[in-house]
Amino acid sequence: MAMYDPKSLKAEEFINDAEIRETLAYAEANKNNVELIDAILEKARPVKQGNGCTCAGLTHREASVLLACEIPEKIERMYQIAEEIKLAFYGNRIVMFAPLYLSNYCVNGCLYCPYHLKNKHIARRKLTQDEVRAEVIALQDMGHKRLAIEAGEDPVHNPIEYILDCIHTIYGVHHKNGDIRRVNVNIAATTVENYRRLKEAGIGTYILFQETYHKESYLRLHPTGPKHDYDYHTEAMDRAMEGGIDDVGLGVLFGLELYKYEFAGLIMHAEHLEAVHGVGPHTISVPRVKRADDIDPDMFDNGIDDETFTKIAACIRLAVPYTGMIVSTRETEAVRAKLLRVGISQVSGASRTSVGGYTEEERPHDTEQFDVSDQRTLDEVVRWLMETGHIPSFCTACYRAGRTGDRFMSLCKSGQILNCCHPNALMTLAEYLVDYASDETRKIGWRMIEQELERIPKENVRRIAAENIEAIRSSNRRDFRF
C-alpha cells in the first residue's frame, strides 16, 4: 500500500487515499470540538508584521475539521477570517479575465464534458489564426487584458504547435488601445518539453483541473482517452514546474465526488507543491458541474448547495491564504457575490464558453462547454464590483515584471505586493474607464479611483500613480506599472 508523503513525486503518495480517509474520520470526530476549532481558527488569522501581514495557513487535517464543523457561529467566524485574509493580501481588488475557447475537438471520453469523443451531435470547431485574431479583437473591444485559453485534447487537431501559434497570434494583436497582456493556458497534461515550450511562448499561469482526486471515480469518469491515466494527469504540475513554469493553477470539479474528499485532496496537492517546489498554487479554481449539451448534472449525485459551496471557498482561503481564488461565470451573480466575501480574488466577465463565441452577436449554445449562469456584460460586472466596494483590476504587471513563482509569493507573504498591486489596479481601471466604460460606469469609477488613491500609504507612489492616471485620461498614454 502506498504511504503518504507530500514530498513524493508519485501521485498515490502525495494524494494518498488512506491519508484522506483518516483525515475525514478525524474531521468527523472533531467537528463539534469547540476548543480545537477555536485553536484552528486562531492559527488561520492574519497577523500584522511590520508593514505587512503573515498567515500560517492550515494543514489538510485542520482545514477538513473546519469544513466538517456545523456550528453556525464558528462558520460565521470562518467567513470573517477568510475575508480578513483576502483583504490583508489582495486588498479589495478583483482581477478580471475571460476564457477563450480555441477548439472543442477532443479524444477523451470524460462523462461530465460535452466535448467527449462519443458526442456525435455537437458541432466540432477549431479556430483558424484569423479567427483567433477576430476573437481577440472582440475581447479587446470589451476591455479585457487577460485571457485563459482552453482547448480539448486532440493530438491531430490541437497539437502543441497549434496552441503555441495561437499564443503568438493573441500577443500579436494590437487593436486601438487594446492588448492582451497575459495569456493563461488551460490544456491537457503534457510533457516537460511541451511545458518548456509554453513557458518560452510567454504564458502566465498553467491551469489544470484535477476534476476529482478520488482515483476510482477518476478512472470511471474518464473511461477512454489519454486523460484516463490518473497518475500522469495528477503529476502534471510537477512536470510543468520542471519545465520552468513558475505559476500553476489547481481546481476540482465539485459535484463529481463527495466534496469533503475532494477538498482534502486539493489542499494536499497545494501542500505537495509547497513541499517539493517551495511555492504553492498561484491560483485555485472552484467550478461546479453544470448543465451542457449531452450532459445532465443530475447524473452526478454529489452536487453541493450554495451554502456548502461558500464554506468550501472560505476554508480554501484559510488553508492556502496566499493563493489567488477564481470563480467563473458558471455561477450566478448572487453566488459570486457570496464568494467575493469569503476570499475570491479573480472573476471572469462576459464569458462565452463556445468556440468562436465572442464574434457572434447572439450567444451561441451549440459548442458551449457549460451553461453560463452570469450573462452580464463586462461593463455591468465592472460596475457591480465597484458598487460592492471592489476595484476591478486588469493588471498583469507582476507577470510582466518577472514577479512570478517564489518571487510573487515572497512579496505576497510579506504584504509588500500591496505597494505594487493597488496603484496598478487603479491605473488599469483608469484605462478601462477611458477606453471602454459606459457613462454610468465611468462616473462610479472615477469616484472610486479618487478615493482609493488616498489609501496608497507611500506618498511618492501615490503621487506617481495620480500623475499616470492623469496621463491616461488626457494624453492617451497606456500601460504604466509599478
Image: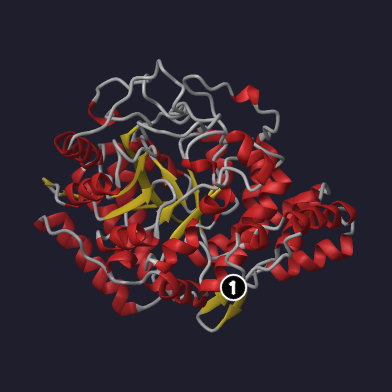
Circle 1 — which element? helix
The relative height of residue 54 versus residue 340 in the rendered view (above or below) is below
Residue nearest the observer in this picture, 4 or 399? 4
Residue nearest the observer in this picture, 46 or 312? 312
Find residue 90 and report its horizontal and vertical position in percent.
48, 62
Find residue 63 and report its horizontal and vertical position in percent.
72, 59
Report how many numbered discs are placed on residues in the image: 1
- Residue at the spot x=59%, y=73% of the render? 275
249 relative position to 159: left or right: right
Give the position of the C terminus as an image quadrant: bottom left
Amino acid marked by disc 1: Ala
- Residue at the spot x=27%, y=31% of the render? 126
111 relative position to 105: left or right: right
Quadrant of the image occupied by residue 476: bottom left
Residue under label 1: 275
Find residue 466 and report its horizontal and vertical position in percent.
25, 66
The relative height of residue 204 versus residue 46 in the rendered view (above or below) is above
The relative height of residue 291 versus residue 131 in the rendered view (above or below) is above
Question: Is residue 450 visible to us here?
Answer: no
Quadrant of the image occupied by residue 256: top right
241 relative position to 280: left or right: left
Question: Is residue 25 visible to us here?
Answer: yes
The relative height of residue 385 versus residue 377 in the rendered view (above or below) is below
